[in-house]
Image (cartoon, grey):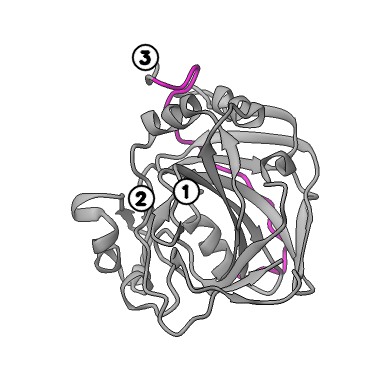
Amino acid sequence: MRRPGVPGAIVATFVIAVALPACQTDQVDDAVADTEMDARPEEDEGEGGHEIHWSYEGDTGPAMWGSLDQSFAACDDGARQSPVDITGAVAGGESELEIRWQPGDAEVVDNGHTIVVNVAEGSAISLEGREFALLQFHFHHPSEHTVEGSAAPIDIHFVHAAAEDDLAVIGVFLEAAEADPTIQSIWEAIPAAGEPPGALAALDPRALLPEGGSHYRYPGSLTTPGCSEIVSWVVMAESVAVSQDQIDAFAALYPMNARPVQPLNERTIERKD
């Protein structure tokens, strides 16, 4: 039985195979699992290997994440949590971001929290002179980051890992305008229940970047349990156009899968041009 709204799309969960550099530690391995890549819908392994059910509402929703398991404590106690409302940004000078994504084969899965696209090895970014390899990207409805209190209909998080045990995530807002062919190809590749991950040939992640390179920078965390504060955030200032039908298609699968904005505390948001 197909879920309404997304042609060919059915909720399914699959093990996501991602090759990490051998020198990365267990902290990054755990963080990658936190970035909505777990094979089980709405659950993670806590300390002791027991499964932890978490969600975006009710008794297992964001307000309760920190109490679900000791390994999720940062969700409550952390001082550099994400997402945040982007307001009061200060000029940060020229961009130190170089995006070197390239076309390649990809896999699409529905892991019970979001739609995830695992990309082939070879795409990377350089951020302030450090190298981060692109692992995957996924979607939130509505956007997790907001700008001056306003959310976009959807945002994409492009997750990158460095060899030094931390992550860099690029956020891109999707706004309603005209249909995007790359988004449509992803939606159509979501696999049916019990089937292997949907295959995409020669997917170009750069097609999902806005034309302008201006972006916001701040230090933060993963936006899913355990909310590890090991993320360098890059949020693009301009958005990418998708159709309202494409927004509605994702919303039919995930009416709400966004963590609320978190206090900025003593952090500064910089705008880079």
Q: Give the spatial CA distance, label 2 vs label 1.
A: 8 Å
* Residue sitting at x 71%, y 69%: 163
* Residue sitting at x 35%, y 68%: 72
Q: Give the spatial CA distance, label 3 vs label 2.
A: 24 Å
Question: What is the x, y in percent for residue 103?
Answer: 79, 39
* Marker disc for residue 43: 2
Is residue 178 visible in the rendered structure shown here?
yes
Tell me: residue 242, above or below residue 116: above
Left or right placement of residue 65 versus residue 20 in this view: left
Q: Give the spatial CA distance, label 3 vs label 1.
A: 24 Å
Q: Which residue is mark 3?
A: 1
Q: Nearer the viewer, residue 42 or 270?
A: 270
- The local crowd at label 2, few if under 14, some if 14 to 19, many if 20 or more residues have their Cα within 10 Å, is many
Dot 1: what SS?
loop
Which span is picked out in magenta? 5-26
Question: What is the x, y in percent for residue 4?
Answer: 37, 19
Amino acid bearing label 3: Met
* Count of numbered badges drawn on the protein: 3
Is residue 230 visible in the rendered structure shown here?
no
Amino acid bearing label 1: Asp
- The local crowd at label 1, few if under 14, some if 14 to 19, many if 20 or more residues have their Cα within 10 Å, is many
Question: What is the x, y in percent for residue 271?
Answer: 62, 70
Q: Nearer the viewer, residue 22 or 141?
A: 141
- Please say whether residue 177 is one of the residues in the magenta stretch: no
Q: Which residue is mark 1?
A: 38
Question: What is the x, y in percent for residue 231?
Answer: 56, 69
Q: Nearer the viewer, residue 252 or 19?
A: 252
Single out the mark in the foreground, 3 or 2: 3
| Lower sequence index among marks 2 and 1 | 1
- The local crowd at label 3, few if under 14, some if 14 to 19, many if 20 or more residues have their Cα within 10 Å, is few
